[in-house]
Amino acid sequence: MSISITDYELRYDTHSIYRVDFFDDYIETVVTHTPSKVKYWINKTRYLHRYRLHKLIVGLDVEWRPSFTRGVNNPVATLQLCVGHRCLIFQLLHTPGIPRCLFNFLADPDFTFVGVGIKDDVRKLCLEYDLAVAKYVDLRELEARRYGWSVQRRIGLKDMAADVLGQEFQKPKTVTMSHWDKPSLSLEQIKYACIDAFVSFEIGRALGAAN
């Protein structure tokens, strides 16, 4: 399976940079808790896609530490955003502050945020961080509309990627159920956090999310 991660080993206090290879694609990935780095990523995204901002698709996913205590829900630890071959992993739980540009980015009605089960992710972001996403669509709903189905499939991102993109990958529970609230994420966590957002973006693009 052609999935790997390369640590550029650039030791900054503010962020880390990685390359994630996913079959024939690669994703430049920034992991940060620093508001200024989030601002830089957003500003560069707006610049790179300045001619199609009116129909921008953004893959969105979040991670949090699982709770095994009834009635206890841990807050979102990381927010992942992906546009094209660029991914941001923002460690919300460890940031000194959320930049205004992120609020504006998520609230832009011209941008379509996509993911599987995205409604729950959006709800948690709003409740826990007051981050409101203006326009979003669940990829399962998008698929049903695209093919004229009356009922959405009960399917996860992994299976959707296999069906829509023809790309298969595994999501080990040792990673998905791990401690996402750690200040330093493991390479496996970073790899799969990136892939989830990237695959969401690619499926959204393939299904015409911005149309």
Image: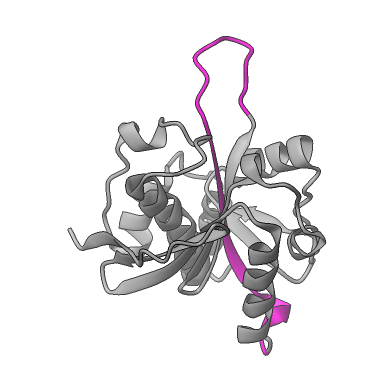
Which residue is at the front of the view, 150 or 167?
167
Q: Can residue 13 be spotted in the picture?
A: yes
Q: Is residue 139 left or right of residue 7?
A: right
Please say whether residue 61 is one of the residues in the magenta stretch: yes
Residue at point 73% right, 79% down? 54
Residue at point 34% right, 50% down? 187
Residue 43 lies, with reference to residue 22, above or below; the image says below
Q: Which residues are magenta?
A: 51-74
Q: Position of residue 3 (x, y in %)?
A: 25, 60
| Residue that sits furthest to the bottom in the current view | 51
Q: Position of residue 151 (x, y in %)?
A: 54, 44
Residue 72 lies, with reference to residue 35, above or below; the image says above
Q: Position of residue 186 (x, y in %)?
A: 37, 44
Q: Can residue 211 be spotted in the picture?
A: no
Which residue is at the front of the view, 87 or 201?
87
How is this picture coloured? one colour
- Give the quarter of the figure containing the N terminus: bottom left
Q: Is residue 130 left or right of residue 53?
A: right
Q: Is residue 133 left or right of residue 90?
A: right
| Residue that sits furthest to the top in the current view | 70
How many marks on residues?
Answer: 0
Q: Position of residue 94 (x, y in %)?
A: 63, 42
Please say whether residue 134 is one of the residues in the magenta stretch: no
Which residue is at the front of the view, 106 or 91?
91
Q: Which of the 4 image quadrants contains residue 106?
A: bottom right
- Give the quarter of the figure containing the C terminus: bottom right
